[in-house]
Image (spheres, grey):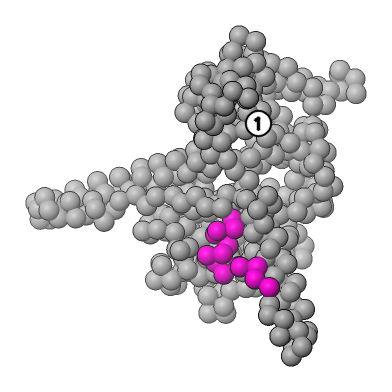
Amino acid sequence: MTEEAAGEWHGWRAATEAALYGPEGFYRRPEGPAGHFRTSVHASPLFAGAVARLLCRVDETLGRPARLDFVDMAAGRGELAAGVLAALPPEVAARTRVYAVEVADRPADLDERVHWLPEPPHGVTGLLFANEWLDNVPLDIAEVDADGVPRRVLVRRDGTERLGERVDGAEAEWLARWWPLSGGAGTPGGGEAGPSRGEEGLRAEIGLPRDEAWAGAVAAVDRGLAVAVDYAHTVGSRPLFGTLTGFRAGRETAPVPDGSCDITAHVALDACAAHGEATVGARTARDTEGGAAHTARDTEDGEARAAHSAAHTVPRALLLRQRDALRALGITGARPPLTLASTQPAAYVRALASAGEAAELTAPGGLGDFGWLLQPVGIPAAPID
């Protein structure tokens, strides 16, 4: 590729935005994400069944509202939205309004009951579910230079990189809190074998855009639960050189921002959780302040104000591994008893296949290692225990 064809230098966030979501971007291609990588949704209908059970638990917690919402973020071709709708009990399905949120055009064969939107609806009462969405929210990359300074990584369309300006402002603050690149040990526990923080070449993915995207999704929920599912890490185990990579036709490849491949990076779910809680907290504070003022005018009773405030405490976000979340939702992967093979051979074969699919969804080192972030909104806790 010539230098002219390679194009100008951009930060990874801008380059990824164009490569994935531009007019000829990867996510607008006709084959959809399933043509290039396998998610839990594609692995087995058991996943949609588990999400449907979670939606039913949210429904019970909400007191079975007249309208129950299910929002599928980054819906691909609507596979999860359609699967959840099919798995719901008829009485719940009759009250459920299903939304698929995706930048690509609506598939022609999608269930007509699924509403196709480019942005999540507001005022959601129910479950907003984001499976492998945040890992495709574009972000910038920082790399430590020879002087120990984190600088923005610039990239051209052909994937060639160089270092740009120093990271500063809100992004530098995010790095300092959530992914430190200077000072301290390079590995959890400070082992001597790994490079030290501040060493040239160390990289971090600046997750602030994902925090903001998640906060926006949480803000769309009036009452219910927001869930994000992704490959993830937390502040005590950030990878030293980042996780930016590409996928094409089912294989991992170099992340080249030319629209030919998916570009993804694991998610700092703990940072997203903090921003989600802050979003709920800000809304709760506004509601509490307004309610307390109304109560004070009516009763001038300090105890009543305190009781009102206690009733509006911020529910904490919950972080789980996918294997633990799915087991709590009834997916165990247990093999059927051998006695079934002789008494009901067809049922045994079906149960064995289901056990294999469940094992894939919960496998350590694979899909079972995904992180689940559950943020309750207007309910005391995530109904998953």
Number of other residues with Cα within 10 Å of mark 1, as a class: few under 14, some 14 to 19, many 20 or more? some
Residue interval drawn in magenta: 322-335
Could one spot residue 171 in this view of the protein? no
The residue shown at (47%, 28%) is 177
In this rendered view, identify the residue nearer to me: 297 or 335.
335
Q: Quadrant of the N terminus?
A: top right
The residue shown at (82%, 45%) is 251
* Relative image position of residue 371 (x, y in whole percent): 57, 49
The residue shown at (75%, 72%) is 353
Q: Which residue is mark 1?
A: 242
Q: Is residue 262 above or below residue 122?
A: above
**Residue lying furthest right in this view?**
1
**Residue lying furthest top in this view?**
147
Is label 1 in a helix, a strand or a loop? loop
Please check the rendered image and state whether residue 257 is part of the magenta-colored stretch, yes or no. no
Could one spot residue 57 in this view of the protein? yes
* Relative image position of residue 197 (x, y in whole percent): 57, 21
* Relative image position of residue 277 (x, y in whole percent): 41, 45
Q: Is residue 150 above or below residue 367?
A: above
